[in-house]
Image: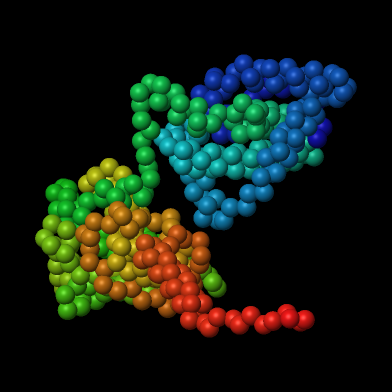
Amino acid sequence: MRSNSTPAAETTPASPSDGLPDELRARYADTLGEAHARAKTEGLRLRVPVGVAQDRAIRAILDAASASGANPSAATVAAYRRDHARLWAAGATPLDKATTRAHFDRLRSACRWVEAQEIARLRDLAETARKAKDLDAMRAYTVAAFERATVFRLLFLDSERPTWARKAQAMRAAGLRPMSKSKRQAGRRALSPDRLLVALGQQPGRCARVEAMAMLFALFGIRPAELVRGVALDNTAQGLRLGVAGAKVDAVRGQPLRVLEVEPTRRGQSAIALAFLRAHVDEHGGEFVATPADVVAVRRAMRQAQPGLSPYAYRHARASDAKATQGRAGAAAWLGHSNDRTQQGYGNARSARGAVAIKAARASRPVRQTKTLPLTLAQRFAQVATRLAARTSSQSAKNASPPRRRLPKPGW
């Protein structure tokens, strides 16, 4: 890419949104000044305009960034851009906003991917401006890409880049404990469905539609995307039956359809919640189709009822109950998995509190068994009993066999 030799540091980006936020520019002012000076020195050494030296540095950083081979899906890209937009508006880095290691990893991945795309976009705009002989725009886009690439290298490529371990160590030294955003942890302390219903009823202006959808999440632990697709609820003799069309399904993954049945436990756990939904089915029917706005409203209501509470927290809670009562295959069918391995990321049988009596889970595909999960205590006892029985039978057979006669050697 061609450029004249006007010092790039004296120009401004083509638009405010193309350059670094003021907060990041102030934080990394010394680093940016050194980078501009190095680019000018490199241009003099190679006898090329400073813009060419800057473009070479940009290209090297983009090449290093592309070595990760990341290829996120469209949904992941949308989530990445939302996280990046929040950080960019606040002028913050992923480490500034992260509260846990998992939170930091998510923000770092989002910011790294989006920033690499934006730097490449600015470089393309600079090349387009060069071909159009718009030298001012070319210089402005090159400076914007160069400065963002310089900060990108510090945050994501440099050997001294910021890591969560440093922040966690500093927080521990200050006597602070990182706030956990783990959905599994939130599931362990989640309100029972009855207590959640009472808490929602005390929120001013809370409509019955939000309460009903919140109860579906609390009782069945379905995915929000599955409620957006639509579910069918029906009353049974004592409880409820829910038909669900799976959200994460392809040729081999997930369950296209599954039917989940629950019954109430004692009052204060799920008896009131099930009675509420049973009455809703009698009065309005059992078809539920949520909109994205409905899901946002449910999440907001759950957070108000208990910090950290969400539909996925209840997914972990119901997964714990399913693991405790339905076994691996039953838990996989309940969660909508096609194998019994994926469930290891959800809940824990030891954490089950029995807030909901899970009666049955039927899925449209058979659950594939894998050998990656640890054996249960009953399975280990069965293996030991089988080995002991085999050893006992072999010893009995050996004792029961007649003694071998010793034949005389030749010449006796």
Q: Quadrant of residue 143?
A: top right
**Residue 383 in picture, x, y percent from top left:** 43, 68
Q: Nearer the viewer, residue 330 or 384?
A: 384
Name the residue rendered at 26%, 68% in the picture: 358
* Left or right placement of residue 69 versus residue 107 in this view: right
Coloration of the structure image: rainbow
Quadrant of residue 263 within the rendered picture: bottom left
* Image: 336 above or below 366: above
Q: Residue at x 67, y 82 (%)?
A: 407
Residue 120 vertical position relative to residue 16 in the rendered view, above or below: below
> Is 324 placed above or below 52 here?
below
Q: Position of residue 66 (x, y in %)?
A: 69, 44
Residue closest to the far right: 47
User: Which quadrant holds residue 62?
Assistant: top right
Q: Residue at x 17, y 50 (%)?
A: 199
Residue 292 makes an appearance in the image: no
Taking the spot 13% from the left edge, 62% from the top edge, the residue there is 266
